Image (tube, grey):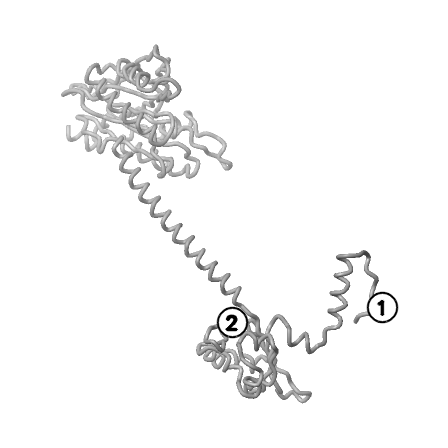
Amino acid sequence: MCAAGPLPEPSGAGKEEGSYAAFAALLEDSAEELYESAPCGYLSTLMDGTIAKINNTLLGWIGLEREAVVSRMRFTDLLTVGGKLYHETHFAPLLRMQGEIGGIALEIRRADGTRLPVLVSAAVKYSESGDPLLIRTTVFDAGDRRAYEEELLRARKAADEARRQAEADRARLQDVLAVLQAALLPDTLPPLPGMEAAAHYRTASPDRLGGDFYDLFPLDARRFCFFLGDVCGKGPQAAAVTSLARYTLRAAALHDPDPVSALTTLNRVLLEQYTGGDLRYCTAVFGVLEPDPATGRVAVRLAAGGHPPALVLRADGTADFLPTPGGLLVGVLPDARFTAADTLLGPGDTLLLYTDGLTEARTGQNRTALYGDEALRDFTAGHAGEPPRAVIEALVGLLDGFGDGLDDDAALLALGVPAPGSAIEKQR
């Protein structure tokens, strides 16, 4: 309740006097004025829906005179066909049962035939004895809200369509990248007489081309060449270097299969192709296999340029690195020196080559620790004596376990001599 007495004096002039006048005019509004000029529609109906009272606001919305509405029309006469059906089946029964209902979306049919979306609330007025007397209804113009909702719906549909298009574009891009990636790797590994070979390639992201590469091919009737490498960078530029490195090493092997000579040739080609500020380089391991049918052993000669050392898994259950000291990154210095290393694979032994995407995978609860060379040696020692395919399968499981900790591509190549009694050994 407002306290009686004079209105407070305005604290200033100008704007303050205008506010004071508006406040005074507001207090002078009659209840009738507030009803007739309210920003929403009001009407009262008898229990059968006959309109007994309606304000000017609602009359203006529907475009009818008061005399044509009061006592001559029912509330349902103001509604569209669908609104009438909803009123009879839902609105009216709920109102009778609950005594009030609020926020129901309906449509009013105007005199000119257009439709006005509205939100309707209604309450039953009861007599002192509890008998229903009339229904008081409030109608809010929901045209702006409907337009806003329709705009939201259009925006949502547009966003959904854009998302579907983006997903389709990404799928097409991944298909193209997969084809391009496959073109940088051998379709299949050739059969090795008296040996077994297995490989695996894992991209860190299907949305970009990787920079790892490997290959295995016959040099002549008794020798095979192999290599595995990792180009600096990702994407189309790295793919171009990958293609250049792969075919350069293949061509170099035909000219001179010595591993040091092959890496030296690749180093020279990269320096000639990429000069100035566009320096491109890679790490690589190149080697030659020479099986001895008489002994069942395989002589291995390899050289590495800045690449992680190969692992030799022995049939006796041990695993250790094959050091290749002094190997510099390929494509950085014109006088890079590479050093060869030799080993002998006997029955049950496997030579494993890998890229640093494997050893630099992030592990631990916070994904801050690197997997590391020693962990890899210990892991592979648990699979020493197994055939190359089994070793690769175990490493694939290891890569799967890294999850989002695998930030870089990983390439694996395993070359082994079958153990006595194995299926491949029996075929010899």
Eyeballing the image, is 57 above or below 405? below
**Residue drawn at the location 66% of the way across and 76% of the way down:** 35
Using the rendered image of the protein, determine whether residue 311 is visible from the camera's viewpoint.
yes
Query: How far across and down, in percent of the image, does residue 145 sit?
Result: 53, 64
**Residue drawn at the location 36% of the way across and 22% of the way down:** 280
Eyeballing the image, is 20 above or below 34? above
Residue picked out by circle 2: 105
Q: Which mark is residue 110?
A: none
Q: Local crowd at mark 2 within 10 Å, few (<14), some, or many (≥20)?
A: some
Query: How far across and down, in percent of the image, does residue 235 sit?
Result: 35, 32
Q: CA distance from mark 2 to mark 1?
A: 45 Å
Q: Nearer the viewer, residue 248 or 23?
A: 23
> Farthest residue in the right direction?
5
Eyeballing the image, is 44 above or below 350? below
Eyeballing the image, is 43 above or below 365? below
Query: What is the quadrant of residue 378 in the picture?
Result: top left
Identify residue type, mark 2: Ala
**Residue drawn at the location 50% of the way across and 82% of the way down:** 77
Identify residue type, mark 1: Pro
Q: Which mark is residue 6?
A: 1
Query: How far across and down, in percent of the image, does residue 334 sit?
Result: 34, 12
Query: What is the quadrant of residue 94 in the picture?
Result: bottom right
Q: Which mark is nearer the camera, 2 or 1?
A: 1
Mark 2 or mark 1: whose residue is earlier in sequence: 1
Q: Is residue 416 left or right of residue 356?
A: left
Q: Is residue 371 left or right of residue 388?
A: right
Assign the C terminus to one quadrant of the image.
top left
Assign the N terminus to one quadrant of the image.
bottom right
Query: How far across and down, in percent of the image, does residue 66 sit?
Result: 58, 83
Q: Secondary structure at mark 1?
A: loop
